[in-house]
Image: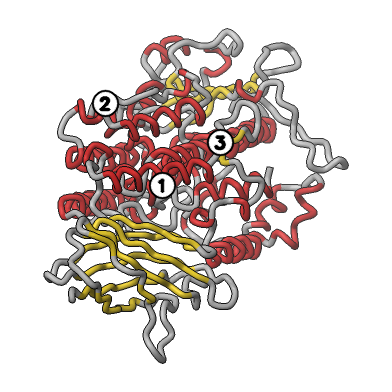
Amino acid sequence: MPSYTVTVATGSQWFAGTDDYIYLSLVGSAGCSEKHLLDKPFYNDFERGAVDSYDVTVDEELGEIQLVRIEKRKYWLNDDWYLKYITLKTPHGDYIEFPCYRWITGDVEVVLRDGRAKLARDDQIHILKQHRRKELETRQKQYRWMEWNPGFPLSIDAKCHKDLPRDIQFDSEKGVDFVLNYSKAMENLFINRFMHMFQSSWNDFADFEKIFVKISNTISERVMNHWQEDLMFGYQFLNGCNPVLIRRCTELPEKLPVTTEMVECSLERQLSLEQEVQQGNIFIVDFELLDGIDANKTDPCTLQFLAAPICLLYKNLANKIVPIAIQLNQIPGDENPIFLPSDAKYDWLLAKIWVRSSDFHVHQTITHLLRTHLVSEVFGIAMYRQLPAVHPIFKLLVAHVRFTIAINTKAREQLICECGLFDKAIKARGMESKEDIPYYFYRDDGLLVWEAIRTFTAEVVDIYYEGDQVVEEDPELQDFVNDVYVYGMRGRKSSGFPKSVKSREQLSEYLTVVIFTASAQHAAVNFGQLFLGMYPEEHFIEKPVKEAMARFRKNLEAIVSVIAERNKKKQLPYYYLSPDRIPNSVAI
């Protein structure tokens, strides 16, 4: 009788193992096997991190194996199980991989397909079409859209983390990581000792410096020593945590009535302010978005204020960006003066602090929360709703939305877009010239990473889509793109997202936006831990894709070397977009 060797890999995360009964049956083109209990005598099966093998003998030849059915039944108490993959060795000596990478909870049956990526048109057998359809029907019941707040992209329909599908909840150790990281941050900042400082006025800048007494690294020390200087203020608009607001000023706005006489002590080329504008040496950051917004009222005993400033900056002869004029509100007038570097030291310093405060608000709510976290969640929900696990685009994106929905749900529970191509966004703000603006490392490194991602996605797209017509006629792909536009982006053309994709090039750019937003862009405005180009869950099994992944990693390694070499010469290195510091998703 034919005999198969079944190898079962259990996840290595906490509580991944199970003591429940696990049954397996095989579905082939010539028939189905009986249900077999996977159990070895005097052995603890399916322990955390284990890879267990079993011999399964069937009564007759099954033909080509199409599906593997896994059934979990309660032994004593329901015991969740994380199944990584199953490998099947056939009687003819062939090996077939069945990726899973899912939690199996309760008394359920899970049906797995082999790991070859397939478009809908590739499935001609009824049982495979049916499996594909049922998977999406089930997911669409689990992953539902919900309006969190008016005006925001739609989010997952879950009030709290425990309401999420088990597969996208944090692993237990990931939750512990957040607690430990928070505690470590509090320890570093001495927050417990200085918490009262945030609820009352500070006496002097020394109070602020005491908070950072335990932080000791090159960047934090340099910022702490030079934060009051104009050069550092300008540098932060290029390479700080919010490097996406500064743009070249092509015309002085009427609402900022600054004159040459006011700023002539800052201009170094013996030109008028208007001439400096014409030569491209003037830049502007306008926080108009904050105009009319009430300050947060978290503490009824403390008055809080929020400005909507306009900051004018100048590229000096050393090609460094420095501030030359600040107006704290949008409407000019006697009660809204323009602050200048020639003003009293602390008047000018306080004006810059107000700008930094406004920059913080825009950074956290728009640049960070909206344009990375919430937009990435939209991609994740649409992916789970419209792309089956066998689809190549699901396999490509799943690592980049890992834990994204979970971290956003926790944020909505406990705390409280615009999207464009990276290079076009840079050009739209007039910031593309390396000769004119040589110290804009966010731009330089971002373009390198963007191009590496684009090259990789183009390779993957070309493997599975031999022409533009195949892209246009992929119903699952088009449903995914449409879900993002209609539900995630609320059908707004201004979001920059298309309703459909019609070519391989357009699909590659779309996927580059998804991956860059979830990885590099988030790293640039937040931080990095685990790394772009690493795919520990092997959803792809085909050799051409694995080779493309290897080339992607090689390209990223070259970028790491370029950035490291440049940083050797910098007193203030910029490494946020070094690929070895870019996480795969916003939550890793």
Neighbor class of circle 3 (other Cα within 10 Å; few <14, some 14-19, many 20+) is: many
Q: Is residue 319 left or right of residue 118?
A: right
Q: Residue at x 26, y 26 (%)?
A: 472
Q: Is residue 169 left or right of residue 512?
A: right
Decide: is 410 above or below 329: below
Residues at marks 1 and 3, CA–CA distance in whole angstroms: 18 Å
How far from the left and from the top, in percent, is residue 76? 58, 78
Q: Which mark is residue 145?
A: 3
Residue 374 makes an appearance in the image: yes
Amino acid found under the numbered disc labelled 1: Glu
Q: Residue at x 48, y 25 (%)?
A: 486
Residue under pointer 2: 472
Residues at marks 2 and 1, CA–CA distance in whole angstroms: 23 Å
Residues at marks 3 and 2, CA–CA distance in whole angstroms: 25 Å
Label located before the other in sequence (1 or 3): 1
Q: Residue at x 26, y 40 (%)?
A: 119
Residue under pointer 1: 135
Amino acid found under the numbered disc labelled 2: Glu
- Residue farthest to the bottom? 42
Q: Nearer the viewer, residue 344 or 405?
A: 405
Which quadrant of the structure image shows residue 278? Answer: top left
Label located before the other in sequence (3 or 2): 3
Residue 574 makes an appearance in the image: no
How far from the left and from the top, in percent, is residue 243? 46, 35
Amino acid found under the numbered disc labelled 3: Trp
In the image, which is nearer the foreground, mark 1 or mark 3? 1
Q: Which mark is residue 444?
A: none
- Residue farthest to the top? 254
